Amino acid sequence: MITGFSLLAISKSISTATRFDAINPATGAPTGIAYHAASPDEVAAAAQAAAAAFETYRQTSLTDRAAFLDRCAANIAELGDLLIQTASSETGLAAPRLAGERDRTVNQFRYFANLIREASWVDAVIDHGDPNRTPMPKPDLRRMRRPLGPIAVFGASNFPLAYSAGGGDTASALAAGCPVIVKGHPSHPGTGELVAAAITRAVQQSGLPTGTYSYLHAGGSRELEVGKELITHPAIKAAGFTGSLNGGMALARLGASRPDPIPVFSEMGSVNPVFILPGALEKDHTGLAQRLHASFTNSTGQMCTCPGLVFVVRSPAAESFIRLLDDLTTKTDVMTMLSPKIRESFLRRLGEIEKIPAVRRISGGPHERSTMQGDHDGNIGAFGRPTLLITDFAAFKQHHTLREECFGPETLVVVCDKADDLIAAAGIVEGSLTGTICIDAASASDTALAARIQSTLEPRVGRLIFNGVPTGVEVASAMVHGGPYPATNQPHSSAVGSLALQRWCRPVCFQNCPDSLLPAELKEANPLGIRRLVDGRWA
Amino acid sequence: MITGFSLLAISKSISTATRFDAINPATGAPTGIAYHAASPDEVAAAAQAAAAAFETYRQTSLTDRAAFLDRCAANIAELGDLLIQTASSETGLAAPRLAGERDRTVNQFRYFANLIREASWVDAVIDHGDPNRTPMPKPDLRRMRRPLGPIAVFGASNFPLAYSAGGGDTASALAAGCPVIVKGHPSHPGTGELVAAAITRAVQQSGLPTGTYSYLHAGGSRELEVGKELITHPAIKAAGFTGSLNGGMALARLGASRPDPIPVFSEMGSVNPVFILPGALEKDHTGLAQRLHASFTNSTGQMCTCPGLVFVVRSPAAESFIRLLDDLTTKTDVMTMLSPKIRESFLRRLGEIEKIPAVRRISGGPHERSTMQGDHDGNIGAFGRPTLLITDFAAFKQHHTLREECFGPETLVVVCDKADDLIAAAGIVEGSLTGTICIDAASASDTALAARIQSTLEPRVGRLIFNGVPTGVEVASAMVHGGPYPATNQPHSSAVGSLALQRWCRPVCFQNCPDSLLPAELKEANPLGIRRLVDGRWA
């Protein structure tokens, strides 16, 4: 069922020039399937097919497009256990976590299908004209969102389903009316191809142009080249990326350096600071430690919203909290990481952080080769040990490296001397997807302190969480999965929720357009019955 | 009343290190006021003051902020004739045009005041939680738009009022809750300072922090440096620019190359193609010629929406149309351009275009030094002669330079052999603020052809105009003043209308936030009574 060849506008690629293998990170063994990176000609062919498909696809009715998205959802769901097994063997992520991610991925297509059926996302605005106005007649103006054009999607290694071949970027771009070309992630090519095949089946079933969706295998010596050729192709009008700061900014620079620059939406690194207020610690240090431990070790700490920084004020409760967090972490076994490369980065970042004298490792044991386990063929898996570090606020202020993401199962507890240090800390954390404040809602002093932290923290995060953990991103219209740099390079955007769709659109205004030539959404009689702002009133 | 010193967070700058003069382009004579470019320390002081002001200003109520915008409007209106005379002497634009622009500028502040009073622009979305959902409780999520932070505004030379010290970028950013620092345009420093003083008076009258608004004189050897220091200052969170492609892209690169990249919204060059269909020409070639002549010579052709390309199909009516356009253009006297520098660019671009053998000058006469007129002191004004050029579709296809903007009173008529060439032309024009289609609405063939041109043209423009001219940008919610590159570098945005405000905002999500800590717009009881999307329904 997995062929190892790219899916180019439904037809299969044929280039065998660059071959690569996927590795099972739990064993270090190759998965045994030969994957073939798309050739430069194949990248160009996919881009041209997408440009051709755009002419038709952008004019599909919202109903037809929604039905197509529902078919994508159904086809992905139908992949069943094969998808979960393939993804697990390529990523080391546990089957239950992947099953949950699969459901989220399927629901994401359905969410966008429902969103576009309702049609208010086009943001239709009508200002009627007045030919008798002096000194100049007032023109009839009508605007709505229209799709940008073919979109390049760069999937993440840490979400092989929800942010990959058929992830949020793909689903939202297809919903907006944009063809999609996915540059497959080399660490889960089988998973990517299975999902891509499910989507191309939906393209066929829906009678859409073949260029509506393509999937490019990228690996080996062409791992970076495929993406570079794709994002610089003239047919591509925008790109979405989820991954590292370096990767995201490299793509943003490529997009900006084109003769015609295009927007690149990169969701990148995030430390997701957590502020635990004194009252909250006093009230339930046990629950807080348990929830934080579960959150920072979730999926081997490889979530964009992994809590990397925890701020507490020195107190007996704080000591108990740290002691329990230490116990839980010490008892947690080594965990499989996504790939040897990600394990290496994790160890390198840990090294940078632990080099600072005021940082102390509480639990986590040694990270040497001993934490890698071999199988009977001598292959070695990529394992990481959950690690709890501790430091004080003075060191946090002094060393910028402590404010940067450490991707993996690690969290750094910053013990502050006084409550005001929490506010000062909120003022120097970097842009982050989330910021969390834990309070005892019944405590007046917690609430007053929370308001001050919130005021300082809000300009630095996309989502402010109260009394929760940052992991777990609800697919909902009110969700913001974004934030100031370095969380993203586009603070206006969100990679999840209804705002995700808007990334792939631009506003178009129609002035004095004959009714027969207007899109249905803007016709005077409102044949779609959608909500519109007409002459300043919602109708 | 004009001091020649920058207005830094209400206090006047003191640096006299870099002095520059403004030139009256109609005479070439200096205006006689010594302007002093802001020093590096003064740029930094303004940025720091803006960052400090943001803490307070972003938390002002929408009512208070709207009242402040209304005061800005009133104070600018009160500048009266002095403003018009100063602007006219600095730009060569006629007093009636400037009076109209002043009214638009004043109305723009009032428009944004009304827009934020109504509050639906914050796009409040509430998804209630469900603690009993399995396997995971559903969190309560609420999101809205929040201001980005201090904004740098780079005004345009061609709109000394509507796109400058108190123009659309300034008004929309202040409306969004962002402090503004304007880098003054060196060709109209007196105009800029007068408007800036009116806004700073409004800041004082409204009891707002002094850093809410600053105006930096920039000229002489520091013309570029002031802007560079401003846009790279860590306190600045986004920038708006209106002007040339080179200028806009240079700023975009500066914004992207910061350690923390920021969004830069540049509105740049645009050719604004006009497609005149056979039926329309047949019906009223006289009216079309008159309206197009008025449009391309409006304000000496120095409007962002000046029609630079006109496509017609060869016919007797087309010949009559061109003959009349020629007559009108020949009879039009030389006109004052904004500055000697802009005149030079105009002549250079004309030279590039006229170098192509298949391009013929129909009217416009010689553009040599003879078209510059001297005053009795020997100063020389910056004049441009309205110029009508003609070519055929083959040459248009072949020479890319014909698709690029020529800023000034020039238009190029492209005579096509057949109707299909109009569609082909629509497929190769560059991204533009506007695209215009003129039809005889009663003609079935015009309407059918218009539909095909529209389909090809729409992905390339921000605003599609039927039976009108591109000049004249209505300040209305449905307006889009933007478009694909090179019209702008941010196809998602508009510099005019309600979308202009969104450039200075980002979405923030509040998860399980206690009601007391929520912004008023998101509190459960909806104390502001605003329109919100609650659990998928508008309430």
Image: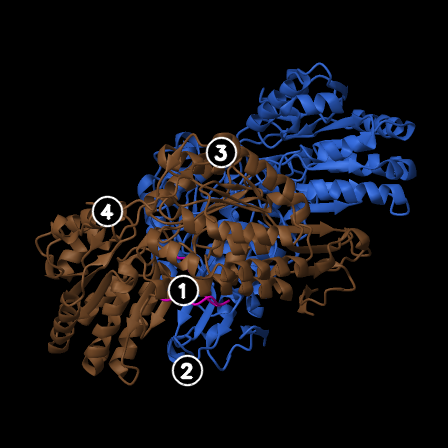
Chain colours: A brown, B blue
Chain ID for label 4? A
Q: Position of residue B123 (x, y in %)?
A: 53, 66
**Mark 3: secondary structure:** loop
Labels 3, 4: front one: 4
Mark 2 lies on residue: B132
Q: Which residue is mark 3?
A: A258
Query: Which residue appears at 75% of the width and 55% of the height?
Result: A140
For the residue pair B210 and B481, the one nearer the viewer reads as B481
The kind of residue tagged 2 is Asn
Does the residue at mark 2 contact the one at mark 4 (Cβ under 8 Å)?
Answer: no
Disc 3 marks a residue whose amino acid type is Arg
Q: Residues within 10 Å of mark 4 (few under 14, many from 20)?
A: some
Tell me the quadrant of the picture where the C terminus of chain A can be found. Answer: bottom right
Query: Which one is nearer the viewer's eye here, A115 or B513?
Result: A115
Q: Disc 2 versus disc 3: distance between alpha carbons?
A: 50 Å
| Tag 4 residue | A345
